[in-house]
Amino acid sequence: MLSERPRVRVLTLGETMGLIRPSEPGHLRSGTSLRLSVGGAETNVAIGLRRLGVGVRWLGRVGDDPIGDVVLATIRAEGVEITGDTDSMRSTGLMLKEIPRPGTSRVSYYRAASAASTMSPQLLHPDVFAGIELLHLTGITSGLSPSCAALVRDAARMARDHEVHVSLDINYRASLWCREEARAELHRLVPLVDTLFGGREELALTSSEGCHTDPLEERELLASIAEAGPREVVLKRGTRGAASYHDGRYTEAEAFAVSPVDTVGAGDAFVAGYLAALLTGRTVVETRLREANACGALACLNAGDWEGTPTRRDLDAFLHDADPVVR
C-alpha cells in the first residue's frame, strides 16, 4: 500500500530553470550526448526535503513554453506541490552545465529577463502561509531583480508575522549582482532569518568582518553574525565538513569522504538534510550536521543537480550500514 503524501510543512520560492547537461563527463566541444533536466536551488532543496519525508510547496513562475512544462512536470513527479503562475510573454530560464572531468563543473546561465525575474510580492496571496512551519529562501532570488528582492523580503516579514521559521541560504552568485549590492540586501534580510546557511566568504557578506584588520576565526565570525538576529548560523565547508553556532554554542562535524562525480547541488542537498533533521525533531546539533553532511556527500555521486539527493532509506543506509553491498 502506498504511503499518503505528507502534509505540507515547508514553503520555498525562487527560479527553477531547464538544465542541459552531458550524460557523462567530458567537454561539450567533443560532441558528448546531452540530456534535459531542471535545476534551481530552491527546488533542489524542496525535492531533497520531500525525499526525506517532509511535505513541501514551491512558489514560482515559468514561461508558457516547453521548458516550463518540463520544470512543472519534474517538480510534480517528485511529490512537491506547486503554486504560482506562468508568463506567456517571457521564457523559462535555461542553464548549460559542462563536466570537463569528474568532480568539476562549469555552468552557463541564460536567464536574463526570464519569467521568474518578474516575480514580485503580488505572488504572496493571503493564505500562502496556512499550515506552513518553515519558509526557505536563497539569495539567488533576491539577485534576480528588484521585484524579486522585494518578494523575498516581504515573504520573510510575512513568515515572521505568522510565527513561521525562516531559513536563508546565501548562495551568492557574482553573475547576478556585485558583492556591495548583495551585502546591502542581506543586511536588510538577515535580521528576519532564524537559520542562516552559507560558505565562509558568503557569510562574511553579512558581517562587519571588513572592519577588522585580520579575518575573524570561524567561531568568531558565526557568533558575530548571530548577534544580528539569526538563532543559528550554519557554515558549509565542503570537504572540511560543516559548523554551527546555535544558542551560544559552536559545533563542528566532519565531512564524509567520497569520490565526487559532480559537486553542483551538494550544498542544496546539505541544506535539505539539515532542515529535514530540524523538522523531524533532531534536537542535537551534531546529529543535524552529520545528516546534512551525508546528504551533501551522496548528492556528489550523481551528475544531476538533485537526482542524487537521498531518500530517508538511502540516508539511513549510508549512515548505519557497515557493508556497502545490500543482499
Image (cartoon, grey):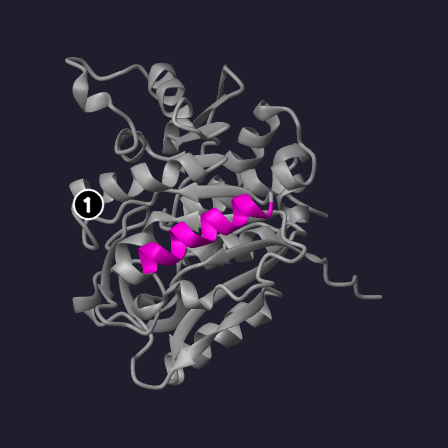
The residue located at (46%, 76%) in the rendering is 85
Q: For the residue labelled by badge 1, is the local secondary structure a helix, a strand or a loop?
A: helix
Task: Classify residue 111 as left or right of residue 269.
Answer: left
Of residues 175 and 266, which is closer to you in this image? Answer: 175
Task: Classify residue 141 as left or right of residue 131.
Answer: left
The residue located at (27%, 66%) in the rendering is 96
Magenta-drawn stretch contains 225 = no
Whether residue 20 is visible, yes or no, is no
The vertical placement of 177 against 256, above or below, is below
Q: Name the amino acid type tagged 1.
A: Glu
Of residues 221 and 31, which is closer to you in this image? Answer: 221
Residue underneath mark 1: 181
x%, y% of residue 22? 32, 66
Of residues 162 and 272, which is closer to you in this image? Answer: 162
Quadrant in the picture for the N terminus: bottom right
Q: Toward which corner of the image does residue 303 lie, by quadrant?
A: bottom left
The residue located at (60%, 63%) in the rendering is 127
Q: Which residues are magenta?
A: 148-162
